[in-house]
């Protein structure tokens, strides 16, 4: 089999997505997600100018060699743009390989280790009462694990709680929305949130929380300690991803389980954290960590250190990324949980998917390949919109981690 064409499809059915579609001389095609929220066009240029032309005529079954060719062959390694571009190609190639084998992808990976994939979804409120109510609605929908975020009194909008989490604005002069942050206000309020959620909804539901990189190690240690009473499933992204040694300090002070890694893009980003067992869950995901090939390697490495998997699965990764993750999730022995924040109906129309959700569990489905396609005609109706994630400033104006 030979690769005959590579298409890079950009569409915005409510959010921007970058999709790689690979065509072969035997009529099989494969698709992969290459979306990098807020920097989509950088990945498109990398793919179009540098990678796609080098794929024509290659044997699509040589996935490992193609991965190494783009990773080592560029000399310039790692980074979110490079790795999202490689991921788009790699995921499309695994899709083709599984279709050629006439199998769902999880069968090629080693077969199912479980019947279904536990997921967690999001609940949030501008205040505690609203957040408690939102958790109740999610429990009624059948979810078994819920990430809870709340607005903080005195701060106008906070990560994960308002409507402005993305500036989706086509105007050329659109700037990212700016939020205001105070760590001391946040640290005082969050334990109150989890006290109220436990009081209202009891102990049978798994609860998670995301600090979104905003704390210092000693602040994270304090929060972990203050939340021990609530028995969280995890506390996520406490400190900025660069501060890996900081996890040593956090770990010494708290038994609250720790998760990190949604912004990591290679196995080397996670090495120290895993080898020293400083975390409990690794959050890398196929699209940002270099595709199925690289994500599988990270998952295997994690298993050596009792670290469990927890693929990032917010809405800014396309249903193709979720589909690919779910095949890995069904196979991986050290599975932890899969994030699922749901999709707008327009997104699901553009990306017809074999995966399904029932009673808080996901399943990749039995379609051959990874089971997600793109409706190219429909995608054309949703052109790219320049859009950014917000930025974050302290109350005195200092730019802070988002
Ligand atoms: O693009 C950034 C989002 O995917 C991220 O902010 C979502 O933190 C997130 C999560 O845990 O899903
Ligand atoms: Mg997160």
Image (cartoon, helix red, strand yellow):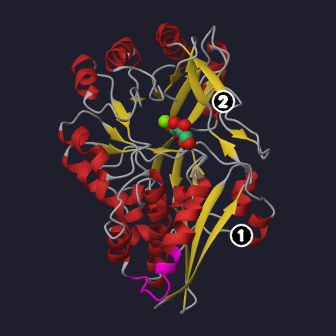
* Disc sitting over residue 135 in the figure: none
- Mark 1 or mark 2: name the one nearer the start of the chain: 2
Answer above or below: position of 260 versus 294: above
Image position, residue 82 (x, y; %): 45, 59
Nearer to the camera, 194 or 85: 85
Q: Could you tell whether 380 is left or right of 251 in the image?
A: right
Q: Is residue 27 magenta?
A: no
Q: Which quadrant would residue 275 be assigned to in this image?
A: top left
Task: Indicate which label's residue lies in the foreground, 1 or 2.
Answer: 1
Q: Is there any visible trace of residue 314 in the rendered image?
A: yes
Q: Disc 2 marks which residue?
A: 137
CA distance for labels 1 and 2: 32 Å
Q: Is residue 54 magenta?
A: yes
Mark 2 burial class by Cα count in 10 Å: few <14, some 14-19, many 20+: few
Answer above or below: position of 284 versus 199: below
Q: Which residues are magenta?
A: 52-61
Residue visible at 53% across and 58% down in the picture: 321
Q: Is there any visible trace of residue 144 in the rendered image?
A: no
Per the picture, the main secondary structure of the magenta-coloured stretch is loop
Image position, residue 29 (x, y; %): 57, 80
Image position, residue 266 (x, y; %): 34, 52
Residue visible at 74% across and 39% down in the picture: 174
Answer above or below: position of 96 versus 393: below
* Disc sitting over residue 375 in the figure: 1
Nearer to the camera, 173 or 13: 173
Mark 1 and ligand 1: say if the CB distance to the nearest ligand atom is below 8 Å: no
Nearer to the camera, 292 or 48: 48
Residue visible at 48% across and 7% down in the picture: 188
Nearer to the camera, 75 or 196: 75
Assess whether mark 2 and mark 1 are in contact (beta carbons under 8 angstroms).
no
- SS class, disc 2: helix
């Amino acid at each position: 089999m030979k690769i005959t064409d590579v298409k890079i499809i950009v569409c915005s059915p409510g959010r921007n997505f970058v999709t790689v579609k690979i065509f072969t001389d035997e009529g099989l095609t494969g698709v992969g997600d290459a979306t990098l929220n807020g920097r989509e066009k950088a990945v498109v240029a990398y793919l179009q100018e540098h990678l796609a032309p080098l794929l024509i005529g290659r044997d699509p079954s040589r996935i490992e060699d193609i991965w190494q060719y783009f990773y080592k062959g560029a000399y310039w390694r790692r980074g979110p743009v490079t790795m999202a571009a490689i991921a788009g190609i790699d995921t499309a190639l695994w899709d083709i390989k599984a279709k050629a084998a006439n199998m769902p992808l999880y069968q090629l990976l080693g077969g199912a280790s479980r019947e279904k994939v536990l997921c967690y979804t999001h609940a949030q409120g501008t205040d505690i009462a609203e957040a408690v109510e939102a958790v109740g609605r999610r429990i009624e929908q059948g979810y078994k694990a819920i990430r809870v975020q709340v607005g903080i009194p005195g701060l106008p909008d906070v990560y994960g709680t308002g409507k402005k989490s993305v500036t989706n604005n086509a105007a050329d002069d659109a700037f990212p929305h700016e939020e205001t942050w105070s760590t001391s206000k946040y640290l005082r309020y969050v334990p109150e949130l989890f006290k109220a959620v436990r009081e209202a909804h009891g102990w049978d539901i798994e609860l998670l929380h995301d600090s979104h990189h905003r704390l210092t190690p000693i602040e994270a240690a304090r929060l972990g300690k203050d939340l021990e009473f609530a028995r969280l499933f995890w506390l996520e992204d406490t400190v900025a991803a660069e501060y890996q040694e900081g996890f040593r300090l956090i770990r010494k002070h708290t038994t609250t389980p720790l998760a990190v890694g949604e912004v990591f893009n290679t196995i080397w980003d996670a090495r120290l954290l895993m080898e020293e067992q400083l975390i409990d869950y690794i959050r890398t995901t196929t699209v940002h960590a270099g595709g199925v090939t690289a994500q599988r390697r990270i998952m295997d490495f994690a298993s050596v250190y009792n670290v469990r998997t927890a693929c990032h699965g917010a809405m800014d990764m396309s249903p193709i990324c979720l589909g690919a993750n779910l095949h890995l999730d069904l196979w991986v022995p050290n599975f932890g949980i899969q994030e699922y924040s749901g999709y707008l109906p327009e997104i699901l129309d553009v990306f017809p998917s074999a995966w399904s959700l029932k009673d808080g569990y996901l399943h990749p489905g039995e379609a051959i390949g990874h089971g997600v396609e793109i409706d190219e005609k429909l995608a054309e109706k949703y052109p790219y919109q320049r859009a950014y994630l917000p930025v974050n400033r302290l109350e005195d104006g200092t730019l802070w981690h988002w």
